[in-house]
């Protein structure tokens, strides 16, 4: 499905209910004659009631009614404006406006009841003076009842009553079963229609402008027109959902795809998100000639990343005032001084977490306890409420952005003491010790396999690690290591992720295109899925600034 098709689907999804609303209330609903069958019951249904004998013994023309039944019909102006005699769907010279047919029943009597306005009665009856002292009330020609023996139907005809907005009247009809009908059970529903004297239906083009009696009883959930609207909207939503989920590769393509080879360097903590975004960029830009080598491990840490970027710019002989368009480096926080040609750009903020082996028996540490542990003042977990297990501190090497963030944000600027063992595998499980590793993955492996270990990592990187079941992500003073925790509870262990370029990446270069994709287009979704907070969405601009 093309973008234009999807746009038209969205437009029709919006236009259809608007047009349906206008049709329902501004066109059709402007003048609407409604009816409700409020009662249709047999006298036998009142068995056991105090008045049952009276109903069952009702007589007409000298005979007892056979299976008497009663229908209460309500006629109402269900539209938004006045209904006049000229609006009825009937011949203008015909006094009748509504015809009600009762199949398999004879009409014994009909009574007007409960008109909303006294003037309504004048359409049904008139007072005729027989002499100076006697006045007789008679039905007008527009109000009559008939029984068609050939068709075995009873019929009542109602006049063209002028009804103001909201006006109504009711008609009570007494009926009986045809004398030679030996059937039992309920009768067919009454049929209400607007027809001329010869019962001819008008052409639909005329009916569009003239009144047609509409059943206004409460519908189960929705009326038939409403069901059509719901079905069309559901179909439109389904089409858009199928396009989004199955035909569009889950996200919209980037605004621009630039060919060339892009080299990525830097933070091991931020690497999973950047790699996933790069794979998404390549998938969307298939055929554009873009290439991003991901098989070789160029993410060796923040310090090494900016060093490699600086060297790549020098090797390429980039002149001052120009930029390198095929290299990017990502760092946890700002890089150290000494790289005057490198330009940082905040991309997101990463959340880091302390991890401890489950046998340490701790889930939460205060900030003071964390500092005591990494300073070497706590050597057994029992000293901070944990199990009787020696503490083993697994640190990253000094070039790690994750470590420098820990020092700056959590340890108050104090570097951890030097390692006691150069190889973490050499730590004595019976004694306190410290060691260092070179990458996030190695950190998690060692923390998961070393009894009583404590280390640190990018928070979402722990979840999918093979050793996650043996690790606990610690809270600090009860604050959780999440992007929401940073913004809402001031969780301390986080850092801004910067993208560095050598000079300004030239417009039209693959580096500039990928940065745009990462910060303004679908790459943002990838970063969000990896648990990173977006600088462009941060509630507090300070959350995208380093210490």
Image (cartoon, rainbow, N blue to C red):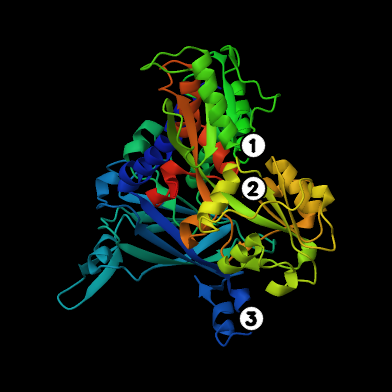
Of the image marks 1 and 2, the number of the one nearer the N terminus: 1
> How many numbered marks are there?
3
Q: Looking at the picture, how far across and down is residue 235, in whole percent?
A: 56, 36
* Residue at numbered disc 2: 460
Is the residue under label 2 in contact with that under label 1 (CB below 8 Å)? yes
Q: Looking at the picture, how far across and down is residue 322, in whole percent?
A: 39, 16
* Residue at numbered disc 3: 47
Please report the residue visible at 48 percent of the width from the left and 60 percent of the height from the top: 490
For the question of whether residue 215 can be seen, the reply is: yes
Task: Tell me which corner region of the image, top left, top right, bottom left or bottom right, holds residue 473.
Answer: bottom right
Distance CA(mark 2)–CA(mark 3): 74 Å
Please report the residue visible at 73 percent of the width from the left and 69 percent of the height from the top: 381
Mark 2 lies on a secondary structure that is: helix
Distance CA(mark 1)–CA(mark 2): 10 Å
In the image, which is nearer the foreground, mark 2 or mark 3? 2
Of the image marks 3 and 1, the number of the one nearer the N terminus: 3
Of the image marks 2 and 3, the number of the one nearer the N terminus: 3
In the picture, the disc for residue 272 is 1
68, above or below 532, in the image: below
Quadrant occupied by the N terminus = top right
- Drawn side of residue 378 relative to residue 497, left or right: right
In the image, which is nearer the foreground, mark 3 or mark 1? 1
Please report the residue visible at 52 percent of the width from the left and 75 percent of the height from the top: 59
- Drawn side of residue 408 relative to residue 24, left or right: right
Binning the other alpha carbons within 10 Å of mark 1 as few (below 14), some (14 to 19) or many (20 upward) gives: some
In the picture, the disc for residue 518 is none
- Drawn side of residue 53 relative to residue 119, left or right: right
Mark 1 lies on a secondary structure that is: helix
Q: Specify the farthest residue to the left.
A: 132
Distance CA(mark 3)–CA(mark 1): 80 Å
């Amino acid at each position: 499905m093309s973008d234009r098709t999807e746009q038209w689907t969205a437009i029709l999804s919006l236009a259809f209910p608007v047009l349906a609303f206008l049709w329902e209330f501004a066109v059709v609903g402007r003048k609407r004659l409604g009816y409700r069958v409020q009662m249709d019951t047999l006298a036998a249904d009142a068995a056991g009631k105090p008045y049952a004998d009276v109903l069952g013994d009702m007589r007409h023309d000298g005979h007892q009614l056979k299976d008497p039944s009663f229908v209460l019909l309500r006629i109402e102006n269900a539209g938004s404006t006045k209904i006049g005699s000229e609006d009825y769907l009937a011949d203008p010279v015909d006094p009748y406006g509504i015809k009600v047919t009762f199949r398999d029943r004879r009409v014994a009597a009909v009574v007007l009841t409960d008109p909303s306005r006294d003037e309504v009665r004048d359409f049904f009856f008139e007072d005729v003076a027989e002499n100076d002292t006697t006045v007789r009330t008679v039905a007008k020609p527009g109000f009559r009842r008939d029984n068609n023996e050939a068709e075995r139907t009873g019929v009542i005809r109602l006049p063209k009553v002028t009804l103001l907005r909201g006006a109504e009247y009711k008609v009570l009809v007494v009926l009986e079963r045809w004398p030679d009908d030996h059937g039992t059970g309920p009768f067919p529903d009454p049929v209400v229609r607007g027809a001329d004297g010869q019962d001819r239906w008008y052409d639909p083009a005329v009916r569009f402008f003239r009144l047609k009696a509409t059943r206004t009883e409460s519908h189960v959930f929705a009326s038939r027109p409403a069901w059509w609207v719901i079905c069309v909207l559901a179909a439109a939503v389904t089409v858009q959902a199928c396009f989004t989920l199955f035909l569009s590769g889950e996200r919209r393509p980037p605004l621009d795809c630039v060919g060339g080879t892009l080299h990525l360097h830097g933070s091991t903590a931020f690497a999973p998100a950047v790699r996933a975004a790069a794979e998404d960029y390549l998938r969307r830009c298939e055929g554009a000639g873009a290439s991003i080598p991901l098989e070789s491990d160029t993410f060796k840490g923040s310090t090494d990343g900016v060093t490699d970027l600086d060297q790549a710019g020098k090797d390429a002989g980039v002149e001052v005032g120009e930029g390198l368009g095929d290299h990017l480096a990502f760092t946890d926080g700002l890089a150290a001084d000494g790289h005057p040609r490198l330009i940082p750009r905040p991309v997101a903020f990463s959340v880091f977490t302390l991890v401890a082996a489950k046998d340490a028996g701790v889930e939460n540490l205060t900030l003071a306890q964390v500092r005591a542990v990494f300073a070497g003042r706590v050597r057994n977990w029992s000293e901070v409420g944990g199990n009787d297990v020696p503490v083993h501190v697994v640190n990253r090497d000094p070039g790690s952005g994750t470590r420098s963030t820990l020092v700056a944000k959590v340890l108050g600027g104090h570097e951890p003491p030097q390692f006691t063992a150069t190889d973490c595998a050499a730590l004595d499980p019976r004694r306190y010790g410290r060691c260092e590793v070179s990458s996030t993955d190695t950190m998690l492996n060692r923390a998961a396999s070393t009894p009583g270990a404590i280390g640190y990592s990018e928070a979402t990187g722990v979840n999918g690690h093979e050793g996650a079941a043996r690790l606990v992500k610690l809270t600090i003073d009860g604050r959780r290591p999440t992007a929401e925790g940073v913004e809402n509870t001031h969780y301390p262990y986080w850092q801004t992720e910067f993208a560095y370029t050598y000079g300004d990446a030239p417009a039209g270069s693959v580096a500039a295109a990928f940065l745009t994709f990462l910060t303004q287009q679908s790459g943002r979704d990838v970063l969000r899925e990896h648990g990173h907070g977006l600088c462009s969405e941060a509630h507090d601009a300070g959350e995208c600034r380093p210490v």
